[in-house]
Image: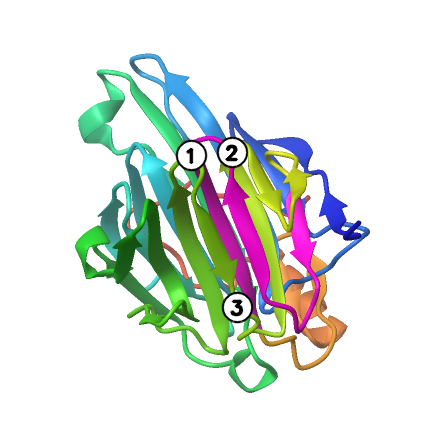
């Protein structure tokens, strides 16, 4: 039987939003450039309540927010102010310093809303760790899609399955949303050295072995693997080229050099950091 590394996520709460966090874990620190993987669980917010992650800093990474349901407002210290909906990609590269806010938009806050999605962090290559900050938004209809024989693949970022996403990733990346109808199969090629599968919903088998939903499963390198859907299923596949060296993570900071993290902590604590226009509240260092 195929031996798979399976990472069972830990439950967390981020400013009132329940999540399951698969990365980082003791079993695996990264998959390709992915160093952080949060599943924002399906949540209904009553009128007057919503997600509200106040102003906080980042270095050395890119954040990618992808929703299946609901709306979020992204604001950052570059002046970006963008509403993000289902199927859109919200892509922010921190570089040497950025701050941002994510919250339920005021336009839907009063009426109540639901939220379900994923947020991942991708470590920047060393040459970009201290580079310029950047934000881009990519509408759902701008992402390439492949459909056929009961299988739908939407490429969120990077390259894979003969598709290329417009999201400006900084290193070879695979991030695909896959929906499979009952009794369909999909060959996952070995085009990326590191890959992992996360089943959101449904009964899925990998090379005939049942995969536990809501666990991150590492795929053996260099092997094409066959997925089989025993029921209508929804999943994502992540991966890419291994990082160019180990990364340290501390709070919202990612770096190849621990000194960069200490500098960032000192700067945030002292208030020497770019600020989000119109925002006064912020999250302090833990």
C-alpha gap between disc 2 and disc 3: 20 Å
Q: Mark 3 or 1, which is nearer the eye?
A: 1
Location of mark 3 (residue): 189
In magenta, the rendered stretch is 216-240
- What residue is shown at x 62% (from left), y 48% (from top)? 206
The kind of secondary structure element at disc 2 is loop
Indicate how the structure is coloured in the image. rainbow
- What residue is shown at x 63% (from left), y 41% (from top)? 21
Number of residues whose C-alpha sits closer than 10 Å to that of mark 2, classed few (under 14), some (14–19) or many (20 or more)? some
- What residue is shown at x 60% (from left), y 63% (from top)? 195
Location of mark 1 (residue): 182
The kind of secondary structure element at disc 3 is loop
Residue 106: x and y in percent read 23, 30
Residue 39: x and y in percent read 53, 39
Residue 230: x and y in percent read 51, 33
Number of residues whose C-alpha sits closer than 10 Å to that of mark 3, classed few (under 14), some (14–19) or many (20 or more)? some
The kind of secondary structure element at disc 1 is loop
Nearer to me, 188 or 250: 188
């Amino acid at each position: 039987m195929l031996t798979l590394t399976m990472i069972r996520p830990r439950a967390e709460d981020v400013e009132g939003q329940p999540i399951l966090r698969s990365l980082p874990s003791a079993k695996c620190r990264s998959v390709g450039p992915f160093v952080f993987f949060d599943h924002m669980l399906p949540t209904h917010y009553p009128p007057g309540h919503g997600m509200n992650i106040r102003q906080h800093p980042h270095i050395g990474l890119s954040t990618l927010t992808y929703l299946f349901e609901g709306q979020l407002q992204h604001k950052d210290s570059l002046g970006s102010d963008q509403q993000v909906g289902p199927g859109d990609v919200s892509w922010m590269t921190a570089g040497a310093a950025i701050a941002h806010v994510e919250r339920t938009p005021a336009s839907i806050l009063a009426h109540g809303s639901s939220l379900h999605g994923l947020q991942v962090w991708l470590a920047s290559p060393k040459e970009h760790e201290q580079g310029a900050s950047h934000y881009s938004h990519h509408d759902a209809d701008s992402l390439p899609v492949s459909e056929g024989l009961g299988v739908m693949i939407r490429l969120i970022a990077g390259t894979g399955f003969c598709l290329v996403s417009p999201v400006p990733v900084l290193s070879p990346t695979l991030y695909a949303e896959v929906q499979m109808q009952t009794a369909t199969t999909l060959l996952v090629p070995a085009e990326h050295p590191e890959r992992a599968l996360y089943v959101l919903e449904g009964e899925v088998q990998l090379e005939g072995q049942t995969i536990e939903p809501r666990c991150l499963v590492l795929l053996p390198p260099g092997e094409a693997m066959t997925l089989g859907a025993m029921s209508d299923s929804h999943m994502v596949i992540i991966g890419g080229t291994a990082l160019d060296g180990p990364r340290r993570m501390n709070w919202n900071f990612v770096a190849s050099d621990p000194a960069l993290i200490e500098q960032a902590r000192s700067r945030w604590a002292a208030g020497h950091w770019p600020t989000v226009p119109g925002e006064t509240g912020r999250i302090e260092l833990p």
